[in-house]
Amino acid sequence: MNAPHLAPLERPSEATLKSLVAELQSRFGSRTVTSAAVREQHGHTLTWLANQPPDVVVYPETTEEVSEIVRLCAATRVPVIPFGIGSSLEGHVNAPFGGVSIDTSRMKRILHVHEEDLDCTVEAGVTRKELNEFLRDRGLFFPIDPGADASLGGMAATRASGTNAVRYGTMRDNVVSLRAVLPNGDIVQTARRARKSSAGYDLTRLLVGSEGTLGILTEVTLRLHGLPEAVSAGICPFPSVKAACDAVIMTIQSGLPIARIELLDEVMVGACNTHSKLDLPEKPLLLVEFHGTETGVAEQAERFGAFAEEFGGGPFEWATKAEERTRLWTARHNAYWAANGLRPGAKPLATDVCVPISRLAECVDETKRDIAASRLIAPIVGHVGDGNFHVQPLIDMDDSAEVEAGIAFVDRLVERALAMEGTCTGEHGVGQKKMKFLESEFGPVALDLMRTLKRAIDPHNIMNPGKIFSV
Ligand SMILES: Cc1cc2nc3c(=O)[nH]c(=O)nc-3n(C[C@H](O)[C@H](O)[C@H](O)COP(=O)(O)OP(=O)(O)OC[C@H]3O[C@@H](n4cnc5c(N)ncnc54)[C@H](O)[C@@H]3O)c2cc1C
């Protein structure tokens, strides 16, 4: 299949932008912002990637307002960049061709909670913590937890996951339906609320993971889960990352319904100890959690302990009190910031890959040896129950040789994961910086099919241009 060409990318003219901004200001008043500080904050700010700010930021409050903004942009062919809280890590919210950042942070209504059906519908700007705060007294929770308190629209758009995915799945599994504004301003509902359906193309899953390139999600209907009766968490040190990964493989292959199983290598453990004032043993560590009944959780923990012992792991220590567990998981969620503290002044090159679980130990082990050979400071942390791990090389951006070494390291990491039938990103997404790997991951036919879909939905290429695949 020959994919049709997408519209060429270029910055809109100053005159076009000026009249668009005037129109937005007349319609949305002080919710249209052009100050440099706010625009910069809406470009990518978190890693070593350069900041590319949009020309203007608008804060809509309803789906209809989003539609109105998109129609104005479509009429003038000005790029539109959807924005949640800006916690994505691969340059997703950068505006390489300028344009309008549509910030969903004022779209905060929790529209429905259907307790009896275990689902809810929220506006895209609600964050995962805000939703869980709201649900707590109802005995329900939403399990997907990227470290950041991300917006649910952003999480759906990046097909996010996190520590709980091994038990509860990713956003792919937990989004029931979406309301979205298409690149021409039309409003679409992708599905009804039924748990399953065989009706037509799966538009929900087309938009989940589309990184703002096919439309702006304005409402998200999500699956909810009952709060488990019992929760227990623990830590288990291992003699090597390979031994820890082998224990993970055995745990998953045995069908043990573990809720969380996270790897921290010894470098990351040291960083977390300093940052979160903990005294964890500075060895490769598995941080685990079990959900279920009191007896179920005790049985699961015992079985996990036996697997760990087979690979030289232990002692297995329990965090029985809720505050201790919260402290451990908060430290885990702050690992990104902890790692940055290892080398003040350096920039993080945060990246992730994912491989089939049987290849996990091999992939992490080879990566560890590569880090040593490259002389990089690069802590590893991972949602290893899914075969997913993150590496965070800390790079001195004034040292061009080090920058090159960082890029070469990520290239090798991705090649390694692809050679093991894995993917270039398990959860962070493609954004700007993983674009170059998609051809090797999918091959030309699948990539052309993606371009054909993009062209059909966004013929003028205004939705988050310059992301996912090149034109
Ligand atoms: C400390 C830290 C830890 C992290 N850990 C994890 C992790 O464990 N797992 C994980 O998956 N990710 C992780 N991330 C990455 C990040 O949190 C996720 O990618 C998250 O889903 C992004 O949500 P956001 O609201 O910040 O979206 P943004 O960064 O604002 O946007 C991300 C992308 O989605 C698009 N977008 C945003 N909102 C919408 C919308 N309403 N409609 C359409 N498109 C939209 C944007 O255009 C952009 O392409 C981590 C990030 C940090 C900083």
Image: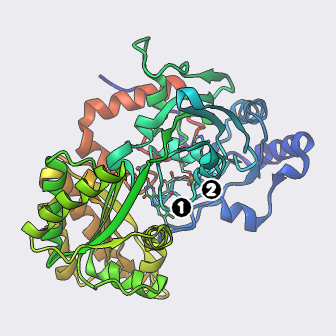
Q: Residue at x 67, y 64 (%)?
A: 41
Say whether residue 420 is visible.
no
Is 232 or 449 nearer to us in this picture? Answer: 232
Quadrant placement of the C terminus? top left
For label 1, the crowd category at 10 Å Cα-Cα, with few meaning under 14, some 14 to 19 and many 20 or more, is some
Q: Check the image and tell me how it is coloured.
A: rainbow
Q: Residue 411 placed where, x, y %?
A: 26, 62
Kindly state the secondary structure of the residue where label 2 is placed: loop
Quadrant placement of the N terminus? top left
Is 463 or 77 nearer to us in this picture? Answer: 463
Q: Residue at x 37, y 54 (%)?
A: 434
How much space separates mark 1 and mark 2, taking CA atoms? 9 Å
Quadrant location of residue 318? bottom left
- Dot 1 corresponds to which residue? 148
Q: Amino acid at mark 2?
A: Ile
Decide: is 22 above or below 63: below
Asked if the residue at label 1 sits under 8 Å from ligand 1, the reply is yes
Horizontal side of residue 307 vs 293, given as left or right: left
Mark number displayed over residue 85: 2
Asked if the residue at label 2 sits under 8 Å from ligand 1, the reply is yes
Quadrant location of residue 182? top right
